[in-house]
């Protein structure tokens, strides 16, 4: 049954561990952070899995941009990139070895 499958399709842009990528396409994401309480700043470039990518079960990531630069100090609050998967299980019949 697909509910128990370790394979699934993503319905959201996401970032997962490389080992869990099965069949995927990448898209570049960057842009600006605008804030009413601080300065604007450019976000770093991320390569994300497109919607419809096939992955092994992985929840994805919530990325704290302070790990890349001091965004909190410049902007005045924490900034995160939401890269978690919206995972829908699919049959693993095409991914079994043997």
Image (cartoon, rainbow, N blue to C red):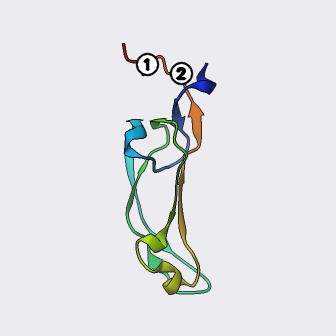
Q: Where is residue 37 in the image (x, y as percent from the top left)?
A: 61, 86
Work out whether 61 lies above or below 96: below
Work out whether 62 lies above or below 92: below
Residue at 47% x, 74% y: name it.
66
Crowding at label 1, few (<14), some or many (≥20) Cα neighbours within 10 Å? few
Work out whether 12 lies above or below 79: above
Residue 17 or 23: which is nearer the viewer? Answer: 17
The quarter in which the N terminus is drawn is top right
Residue at 45% x, 38% y: name it.
53
Crowding at label 2, few (<14), some or many (≥20) Cα neighbours within 10 Å? some
Q: Disc 2 designates what residue?
A: 91
Residue 60 or 40: which is nearer the viewer? Answer: 60
Determine whether label 1 and label 2 are within 8 Å by CB. Answer: yes
Mark sitting on residue 94: 1
Work out whether 50 lies above or below 43: above
Q: Where is residue 33 in the image (x, y as percent from the top left)?
A: 51, 74
Secondary structure beneath dot 2 equals loop
Query: In the image, 13: left or right of 30?
Result: right
Residue at 63% x, 26% y: name it.
3
Secondary structure beneath dot 1 equals loop
Residue 5 or 35: which is nearer the viewer? Answer: 5
Residue at mark 1 to residue at mark 2: CA–CA distance: 7 Å
């Amino acid at each position: 049954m697909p509910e128990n499958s370790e394979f699934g399709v993503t319905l959201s842009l996401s970032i997962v561990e490389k080992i869990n990528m099965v069949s995927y396409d990448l898209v570049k994401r960057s842009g600006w952070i605008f804030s009413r309480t601080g300065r604007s700043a450019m976000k770093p470039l991320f390569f994300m899995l497109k919607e419809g990518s096939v992955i092994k079960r992985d929840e994805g990531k919530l990325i704290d941009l302070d790990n890349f630069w001091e965004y909190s100090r410049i902007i005045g609050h924490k900034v995160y990139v939401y890269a978690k998967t919206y995972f829908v299980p699919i049959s693993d019949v095409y991914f079994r070895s043997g």
